[in-house]
Each structure stands twice: as C-alpha cells, then as structure tokens.
Image (cartoon, helix red, strand yellow):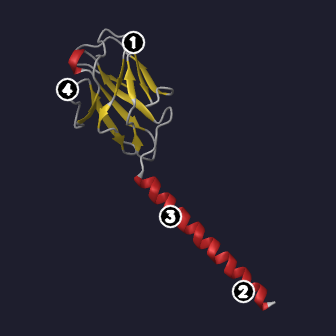
Amino acid sequence: MRGKRMTRRLLVLPIALFAGVFAATWIFLDAREAARPLPGDVVFLRLAAGGGASWIQLYNRTDHRIDLTGAVVSDGQHISTLEGDLTIDAHDTLLASRTATAGAPGPARTRAFWRGFSISKNGGEIVLLMNRERDTMLDFLQTVPMDAEQYLARV
C-alpha cells in the first residue's frame, strides 16, 4: 500500500512541474512577442485631413502589444502600406502621418507614415485600416468636412 501511494505522488509531481514550466514559458513569450491584430483590436482614435498634413492616430484596445507591420491604410481608391515603428503597446497609441515630417497632435510623436494619398478635408471618404494580407478590415472611419485646424476624434 505504501509503495502505491509513493508512486502516485511521484507521477503527479513531474506533471505539475511540467505544467508550471509550460505556463511560465507561455506567459514569457506572450509578454515579449507582439500579436497580429484582429478586427477591433486597433481602432482609429483621431484623424486629420488636408494635403500633406493628413494624419491618423491608432489606439490598441487590447491587453497585449500589437504588431502592425505590413498593415495598410486606404481611402477607398488608393492603398498604401504603413512604414516605420509599427508596434503599439497595450492600451497605447500610434501616430501615422502622410509624410514622415508632418505635425503631431499633443505630446504624441509621429512614429509611422504612409505615402501616396492624402485624406480629403471635404469629407465623405471612408478611411480603412487593413491587415498585411489585405483580407481583414481592422477598422474604418467615414470622414466629415473639416477646417484646416480641426480633426475627427472617436469617443
């Protein structure tokens, strides 16, 4: 009887240790690796329109870092790949502008940019954010007419 109990305890211990190591490794990898976004994970927070001053601010709604490498923005007619530092920490923002030197709202710095098209200040455009494969829309926003000093904000 005593031998059977000892055997059961020895079998349980390695399984518990393996599960603990596996869980610790998984948490460690999750904290270091940036995840690929799903629809609604990253949303438009603010958008400014008008020629070279066009910019968008994206917000990561998740509890983990998101990697937008290869993601594209579109105005419905043109598509441009985002370039620059495209990792967004949990509950943080990323500012992307039409050019690498465009102005930034508030304390945020422009870390990313796109080329080719600008967002019209006349409104009526639908601005899309899509994943790198261009098969999933992460978010979209319809613009409204804006003056030069105005921007569209999502609350």
Q: Which mark is residue 58?
A: none
Residue at image position (53%, 68%) is 21
Q: Amino acid at mark 2?
A: Met
Q: Are marks 1 and 2 in contact (CB under 8 Å)?
A: no
**Among the 4 quarters of the image, the one containing residue 123:** top left
**Quadrant of the frame with the C terminus:** top left
Q: Are marks 1 and 4 in contact (CB under 8 Å)?
A: no
- Which residue is identified by label 3? 24
Give the amino acid type for the residue marked by disc 4 in the picture: Ala
Q: Earlier in the sequence, mark 2 or mark 4?
A: 2
Considering only order in the chain, which callout, 4 or 1, is on the residue closer to the N terminus? 1
Vertical arrangement, residue 49 with respect to residue 135, above or below: above
Residue 33 location (% of width, % of height): 42, 50
Q: Residue sitting at 22 percent across and 37 percent down?
A: 107
- Residue 103 position in % (x across, y down): 19, 27
Q: Residue at x 41, y 14 (%)?
A: 76
Up-down: is 4 above or below 29?
below
Residue 6: assigned label: 2
- Residue located beneath label 1 in the image: 77
- The span from disc 3 to disc 4 (Cα, nearest Å) is 43 Å
Q: What is the C-alpha distance between the residues marked 2 and 4? A: 70 Å
The quarter of the rendered structure image containing the N terminus is bottom right
CB atoms of marks 3 and 4 within 8 Å: no
* Amino acid type of the residue that numbered disc 3 sits on in the rendered structure: Ala
Q: Nearer the viewer, mark 2 or mark 4?
A: 2
Q: Is there CB contact under 8 Å for labels 2 and 4?
A: no
The residue pinned by badge 4 equals: 102
